[in-house]
Image (cartoon, helix red, strand yellow):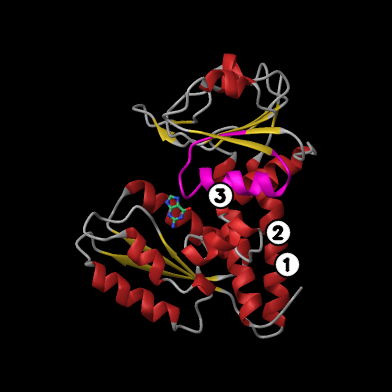
Amino acid sequence: MATVISGKEVSQKVKGEVREKALALKEKGIEVGLAVVIVGDNPASRVYVNSKKKACEEVGFNSYEYALPEETTQQELLDLVEVLNNDEKVNGILVQLPLPKQIDENAIINAISPDKDVDAFHPFNVGKIMIGEYAFLPCTPAGIMELIDSTGVEIAGKSCVVIGRSNIVGKPMSMLLLHRSGTVTVCHSKTKNLKEICQNADILVAAVGRPNFVTGDMVKEGAVVIDVGINRMEDGKLCGDVNFAEAEKKASYITPVPGGVGPMTIAMLMKNTLTAAMIKNNITE
Ligand code: GUN
């Protein structure tokens, strides 16, 4: 039976460290600020934005919410981003995705100053991640690395399989594992022999967006299984991409949904916002 990795616990530890450093900055007269922008009223986005604001409070940051109506134009949002890029109180800018269909997400991401891009979505920061020289961590993959490290399992030389190739999770995840000398396979909807590839994984990261996609027979005995899925079921419950009941019988460590990867993403966002403030003020540790 697997040990369940508590994202709640690991995220508390990360946020505790961020809070200590934020307090030290406050003593120097420096306040840390995160601008959170939400367009429209997607209920899932509202939940995420509220969690991000709450996390800011926990670690002692100022948060500034900008809630814009569904019919906001791309130019109006670009204008707001420009204001925030120039706002001294704002160290990090988070524009919650997805955006309404009249707005091109890439145009917005490209407009955010790379120095304030705490999601690490701007092509400049994505490029930095590629070469392994980065200030901002891609939040979800970096949170997953913390979870894997919390188990004490070595990554170097291990067979790491990532299911999903999104810009937010799959691609940066594969890079971070590669930087730590994992042997990385990225699978997606066109992958042949998915089951066999997964059966070989010492570390399996599922970021597919399909409930219970990873079944017990796909999990290697003793594997570390990380479930990035947050699928809302008809009964309102959250369900991961991994069939937990089956996978936990074979894994050595496994993350639950909820309470696994989710809280880590927000903790890493706080870490990035702190980093932005430290860089801006030329503070190294
Ligand atoms: N929507 C879903 N995940 C994310 C995220 O990590 N950042 C932003 N800005 N929007 C999201």
Residue at figure coordinates x 50%, y 77% from the top left: 90
3D distance between C-alphas at marks 3 and 2: 25 Å
Image position of 119 with respect to 253: above or below? below
Q: Are marks 3 and 2 in contact (CB under 8 Å)?
A: no
Around disc 2, counting alpha carbons within 10 Å, would you say few (fewer than 14), some (14 to 19), or many (20 or more)?
A: some
Residue at figure coordinates x 67%, y 19% from the top left: 220
Of circles 3 and 1, the one toward us is 3
- In this view of the protein, which residue sits in the foreground, 24 or 115? 115
Tell me where residue 244 appears, x and y as whole percent.
57, 23
Per the image, is 177 magenta? yes
Q: Are marks 3 and 1 in contact (CB under 8 Å)?
A: no
Residue at figure coordinates x 49%, y 54% from the top left: 51
Image-quadrant location for residue 80 = bottom left
Residue indicated by mark 3? 172
Horizontal placement of 281 versus 207: left or right? right
Q: Say which label, 3 or 1, has the lower sequence index.
A: 1
3D distance between C-alphas at marks 3 and 1: 28 Å
Residue indicated by mark 1? 20
What residue type is disc 1 on? Glu
